[in-house]
Image: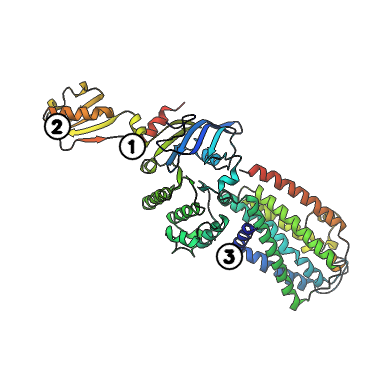
Amino acid sequence: MCWAPGERSVAGMQTTAIEVHDLQKSYGDRPVLDGVTFAVGEREIFGIAGRNGAGKTTTVEILQGLRRRDAGFAEVLGFDPARDRKRLRRLLGAQLQTSALPDRLRVGEALRLFARLAGNRVEWRELAAEWRLDDLLGQPFGTLSGGQRQRLFLALTMVNEPRLVFLDELTQGLDPVARRETWRLIERARDRGATVVLVTHDMDEAERLCDRVAVLHDGRLVTCGRPVELVTATGTVRVRFSSPSAAGVDGLTRIPGVGEVAYDGATANVTAAPVAVVPLAEELARRRLAPPDFTVIRPSLEDAVVSLLNGAQP
Amino acid sequence: MTRLLALTLTELRLLVRDGTLLVFAFVFPPLVMLILAGVFGTQATVGFSWQNPEHYYVAASVGVPVIGLTLVGLPVALATYRERGVLRRLDASGVPPAQVIAAQAVVTIALAVTAVGTVLAAALPSYGIPHVAHPALLAAGLAAGTLTLVLIGVAVGLAAPSARAAQAIGLLAFFPLYLLGGGGPPRGAMTGVMHHVADAIPSAIPGIVDPWLGLSGLGTQLVVLAGWAAVALAATAWLARRTAV
């Protein structure tokens, strides 16, 4: 469930940070958002995924009050982002998809400036220490590595102690080590009490971080749920195990939910619904087969989303 | 105000680190003044409206950093911020683009005033600083020229699709305003057509030279500058809406 009209509980949370209903937006004649509806609970990490041009960035920009919606309802932390942008801004932190800082601006200057712009709610040196930027204070932004930049951006988003943080393609272009470090930082932001909305192409990232993921396609929300739910909803898992003879795998297709069974003389590969895995294991046990390499291979979130988006092709 | 001050100080720090801009603002104008005044000497001719050419070029060169910083430095800085998403980044942090632009304009004006000081500092031991015939009119002409060019610079910065485009547009505007404004050949030496063109462009130089050397009043120039300022303001307002979030 991504949004239930009138319901104030999202994913087991008691309070809602964001409610969006039937959001509409066009650029000229081109519709970008067409009836998007979802809600985000407080202290959730909520992912928004989809192809380029699906409407992800437009959605979060509308929620921050950076763009005006054409129609629909949007409420962020109790405010309408189009009308109460000024009050809302104090409660938000944001890292935009295509934004940077001046190359010559030093890390310490950036932290000090943004802290001052936010009303000095946090001591910028403490922020630098907390986000491990204290060794980089004198370094110009243009000389920072990708990971260092993202660490700085995350620190800057936290400079006003936001209740809600928007992160748009934060880890794009980062090496795996920097990406994983950034993931830890995002979790830290949530641990500090913030709700996080994460726009991402990276399904590993969504699966690893997000409590729930909404998938947009051509401006419409095609699905939304916990990563495990999205994966399960795509249907099948593969089960692989060794079997000394073909007799060991005979008749397995009679188990409800079991699809194809392939046997190459040593290893069986079974395609099955997730609910069929336990009955399959029970059947093997009943046949006194206890293959030590019994392996369930579930599709990744990326497999699930790609399958979903391919199914959503016009 | 505190926010604008913080932004202005940061912008000032960043501009001071821009070596190319500093050369353009602080080296090019005194150099041009030293060369041109040296070339034409002290012989008053009709082309110089019977003024000492050394005096003429000291006065005219005061307008050079004003034109350069407002038409090249400011648009490039603004277009860079737009192109790289710095304006959006600051906007997302609660700083409206108008405040950032205001900070850039304040810094541009401050740098221009400092650069004017550099021209005068270079003139003092070489050709001397000519007597100012009408100080109040000079101040008015300098202020009107600077503010008009700041508005044009902001409009160029908002209109240019990239920093490189802003630089190209700025340089294309700089040279006519510098040369036809009287920074190169004096206006008295121009042919009829070029004289008319020179009268219609928003160069800061005539508004400085004329009251300084007592050549004429400011009436026509102020009208021309006001017209350009109105156009630039309207363009800025339109572009700001078009590029607004």
Three-letter code for the amino acid on which mark 1 is drawn: Ser
Question: Within the image, what quadrant is residue B179 found in?
Answer: bottom right
On what subunit does the disc labeled 3 rest? B
Q: Earlier in the sequence, mark 1 or mark 2?
A: 2
Tell me the tag on residue B17. 3
Q: Secondary structure at mark 1?
A: loop
Q: Secondary structure at mark 3?
A: loop
Is residue A102 visible to us here? no
Q: Above or below — where is A276 with respect to A105?
A: above
Tell me the tag on residue A243. 2
> Which residue corresponds to mark 1?
A300
Report how far apart the C-alphas of labels 1 and 2 lie in the structure.
Answer: 26 Å
Q: Nearer the viewer, residue B128 or A144?
A: A144
Frontmost of labels 1 and 2 is 1
Q: Residues within 10 Å of mark 3 (few under 14, many from 20)?
A: few
Q: Residues within 10 Å of mark 1 (few under 14, many from 20)?
A: some
User: In percent of the image, x 60 and y 31: which residue is there?
Assistant: A29
